[in-house]
Amino acid sequence: MTQIADQQDNLNADILIIGAGLAGLGAANDLKQAGYNVLVVDKGRGLGGRLAGRRIGEATFDHGAQFMTARDSRFQNSVAEWIAAGVAEEWYRSYPGQANGHPRYRGVPTMTAVAKYMATDINVLRQTRIEQIQQNGQHWSATLDNGNSVSARALLITSPVPQTIELLAAGNIDISPTNQARLERIEYESCLAVMAVLDGPTAIPAPGAIAFDEGPIAWISDNLQKGVSTIPAVTIHGSGDFSARHFSKESVEQNHMQMGQQLIDAAAAYLGAARVTEYQVHGWRYSKPTVVDRKACMLASEATDLPPLALAGDAFAGPRFEGAVLSGWAAAKCLIAELG
Ligand SMILES: Cc1cc2nc3c(=O)[nH]c(=O)nc-3n(C[C@H](O)[C@H](O)[C@H](O)COP(=O)(O)OP(=O)(O)OC[C@H]3O[C@@H](n4cnc5c(N)ncnc54)[C@H](O)[C@@H]3O)c2cc1C
């Protein structure tokens, strides 16, 4: 079971991790294994960050990451462990019209199951936002949105990089110009995700998912065929271009539901005779990095007098599930070397 850190005015940890996504949880496990007292804080209600799930009535959706691939040998071992634990399984190797045959794995029953498993022995404080971080001599001090604070010897930040840049600036934390430039080069695309409940099965062929290279839709998947939902339910991801129009200044007046309806209309051929009975839309402002850093993580305290500070996430080791975990592992290794 995930432990919730004791509520008290001031918390102490060897290492404070901002974010209970894959990078944060990957790092937390390695740091705990190395003997450090780790506290993970996340503003979200659930675990896993962009591995998000949602229920609408009887329907269940994976509406963030849809699957994982495994190239790195240590990561392949983790996937094998997750499969043995019953929180992951192979979903498919290709769908009609797609030649590439490498395995795509899914979380069981939903993608967030993997994050929950990774958090088993980790102290996670959920629904708590880190409002500010500050250097306090050779320690870090973080102010939480409930008014409490955390003191830590080292800090790992795993939020999407534009949010990390804001957090550093708000705390007057100066990193080296070289590292600042690395951060500012990183870019993300946004994604509008539609979760639609249907009154009958879709017309999406097995395995129940299709990725598109052009048009307003980037991805459509059938949560019933996938085994996520017990009733017909589709997830539709808007393409980067389509979603960017929604997030741009010109269309702030256009609400999520209208854009969601446009995606549902564009998906008509894949819904077949089924009608949408209800839908919701989630906007991912920082969905996937489109420009990533060249290293697996960043030791942001290098060439400064800051206490150990590392940054990790999918913007470093690769814009996907596996990259986020690898980045967390790399950051843990880096912090262990710094802390001695
Ligand atoms: C719609 C969509 C579809 C995707 N599809 C796939 C796919 O099919 N396959 C694949 O491999 N990848 C996919 N991805 C990418 C994958 O989800 C990400 O690469 C990965 O989950 C990123 O993990 P992370 O730990 O780097 O970041 P995140 O998951 O974003 O974790 C960062 C965490 O930090 C928390 N946080 C941020 N700021 C604060 C703060 N101030 N205080 C407290 N907490 C804070 C956030 O709440 C969040 O939980 C998809 C992503 C999206 C959005």
Image (cartoon, grey):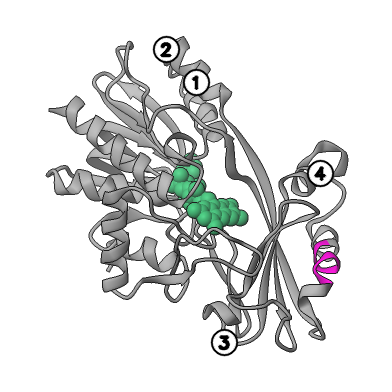
Q: Which residue is mark 4?
A: 245
Task: Check whether the beta carbons of the residues at disc 3 and disc 4 lie within 8 A of each other.
Answer: no
With respect to residue 191, does 197 lie above or below?
below
Q: Earlier in the sequence, mark 4 or mark 1?
A: 1
Amino acid type shown at disc 2: Ser
Q: Earlier in the sequence, mark 2 or mark 1?
A: 2
Relative to 81, 210 lies left or right: right
Q: Which residue is mark 1?
A: 182
Secondary-structure class at tag 1: helix
Eye-nearest disc, 2 or 1:
1
- Give the x, y percent position of residue 206: 61, 78
CA distance for labels 2 and 1: 10 Å
Amino acid type shown at disc 3: Thr
Q: Earlier in the sequence, mark 3 or mark 2?
A: 2
Q: Which residue is mark 3?
A: 230
Q: Quadrant of residue 272?
A: bottom right
Amino acid type shown at disc 4: Arg
- Give the x, y percent position of residue 20: 40, 51
Q: Residue at x 40, y 51 (%)?
A: 22
Secondary-structure class at tag 2: loop
Secondary-structure class at tag 4: helix
